[in-house]
Image (cartoon, rainbow, N blue to C red):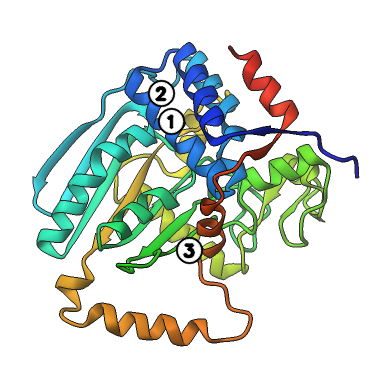
Amino acid sequence: MTAIETTEMSLSEIESLALSVFTKHGCSADNAAALARTVVRAERDGSLSHGLFRVPGYIASLNSGKVKGDATPKIEQSLASVITVDGDHGYAPLALETGLPVLAKAASETGIAVMRIINSFHFAAMWPETEYLAEQGLAGLACTAFKPSVAPAGATQAFFGTNPLSFAWPRPGHTPIVFDMATSTLAKGDVQIAARDGHAVPPGTGLGPDGQPSDDPAEILKGVLLPFGGYKGSAIALMVEFLAAGMTGDNFSYEAGQQDNNDGGPAKGGEFVLAMSPKLIAGDGWQEHNEAFIQTLSELDGIRLPGQRRHKNRLDMGPRHINAALVEKIRGLL
């Protein structure tokens, strides 16, 4: 396999580049800043498929006119525990930054609250929203659907999106437990990076256009991804469809596929976010009880708690090694 040429960039340089290119292509100051924060967090924490890798897709959807760069999210809260954020056909980061504090306040007061984000375009990792809730002392769950790219168990035709699901558990005084996963065996972005970099993917990732299993990411991108764990992952993907589309009233994956212009950017869809207060629901002693559980779990040989790798990466404030061709492509957009 040919070595991939990389270039060093500091986190501030990554943020500056992202901010410049988003502004250049029509994002308002608030939207550009929210997007840039999303990109730099992903690069900082090692979530490479959701960092600078996403920038060309963001720009394509701005230039096609599908997404509003100057969108202004609006909040509705007709029920104490139900928050709706209308993304105004903009990107999800600003809608999330607008709605999450309102959701956290509602859950902290009532014990449990949900937020539905509609008319928005989600293209990023999902751990930032659940981790934010955990930092407020809340357990958080978030999910969103996408365009069809995953075949339900037993089928060979794409119907589900990769339908990611994120969960975070608060640990006051410690970094929270956080996971963020696609319900496909691999996230589509990881398959795209594997195809770009020329390396195989694990067996069970997907089928080629002939309907046969393949470890060639380029062939899988012409075919279909598979759910993790067969029917179990397929059932979780189905659940995400109901929560992210049925519960929000926005697009199911198949509807997003029918409506999208396929410009390379995200499709319009909904996001479902649930926040729960262990303090109010479990009551006194909740933290000590859970810390004892985590401590016992941590003593198992070979264990790594969800989010540990990401939080370790975060401590490194040095430069990141970014795919050089990608950096040149993004700079070319300026």
Residue 265 in sight from this viewpoint: no
Circles 1, 3 touching at the beta carbon (< 8 Å): no
Q: Which residue occupies 14% across, 38% down? A: 76
Determine whether, in the image, residue 110 is placed left or right of residue 275.
left
- Could you tell me residue 302's position as x and y percent? 63, 80
In the displayed structure, would residue 274 be above or below residue 99? below
Q: Amino acid at mark 2?
A: Ala
Q: Amino acid at mark 1?
A: Leu
- Could you tell me residue 241's position as x and y percent? 42, 52
Residue 147 in sight from this viewpoint: yes
Return the mark for residue 236. Answer: 3
Viewport quadrant of the N terminus? top right
Q: Amino acid at mark 3?
A: Ile
Within the image, what quadrant is residue 26 found in?
top left
Q: Which residue occupies 90% across, 40% down? A: 2
Total numbered labels: 3
Give whichever of discs 1 and 3 has the lower sequence position: 1
- Could you tell me residue 69's position as x and y percent? 39, 19
Return the mark for residue 258. Answer: none
What residue is pinned by disc 1? 35
Determine whether, in the image, residue 30 is placed left or right of residue 62.
left
